[in-house]
Amino acid sequence: MPQVIADISVSLDGFVAGPDDSSDRRALGIGGERLHQQLFELDTWRARAGREGGDRGVGADIMGEYCNRTGATVIGRRMFDHGEKAWGDEPPFHVPVFVATHRPLPPRPMSGGTRFEFVAGGVAEAVGRAVAAAVRRARTWR
């Protein structure tokens, strides 16, 4: 049976980016990288992002298992807008990504297995489509 896992890095005061975040200047805002630094330093995350090196400790093992078990991802349009430039031609997801939005775009296939699909029907529809995509992917892994 598929699992749906909610995952986010957030500060104790409820922020996922620093102040003055914008898609054209600073995707994570001023100092926002600190919120996600432990993730960015893991060799498993760095490899998915096309970077070398990184921490190979227990956290890297956990992140590697998490990434290997993820069959699809759901993100919001703001995350897409802020990350699109930073992710480049090969985003770190490597699975179908469903973007919940009120401003849909045509599907966007990328290198490395990432395919962005824009869902205007709400978060529940985006999650439903992600579950269906993950189940399809799981069947091809067997």
Image (cartoon, rainbow, N blue to C red):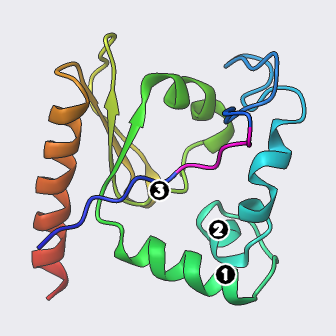
Q: Is residue 121 magenta?
A: no
Q: Quadrant of residue 58?
A: bottom right
The magenta region covers: 8-12
Is 12 displayed left or right of 73 in the figure?
A: right
Q: Quadrant of residue 18?
A: top right
Q: Position of residue 126 (x, y in %)?
A: 22, 36
Q: Is the residue marked by circle 3 packed among few (<14), some (14-19), or many (20+) residues within 10 Å?
A: many
Q: Position of residue 8 (x, y in %)?
A: 55, 49
Q: Earlier in the sequence, mark 1 or mark 3?
A: 1
Find disc 2 in the rendering and name its residue.
45
Image quarter hosting the N terminus: bottom left
Q: Which mark is residue 132?
A: none
Q: Inspect the image, locate mark 1, and give the three-letter code of the amino acid beneath it.
A: Ala
Is 58 displayed left or right of 68 in the figure?
A: right
Residue in front for this viewpoint, 104 or 75: 75
Q: Is residue 10 magenta?
A: yes
Are the residues flagged by discs 2 and 1 in contact, CB closer than 8 Å? yes
Image label count: 3
In terms of secondary structure, where does tag 2 sit?
A: helix
Residue 26 vertical position relative to residue 41 in the rendered view, above or below: above
Q: Which mark is residue 60?
A: 1
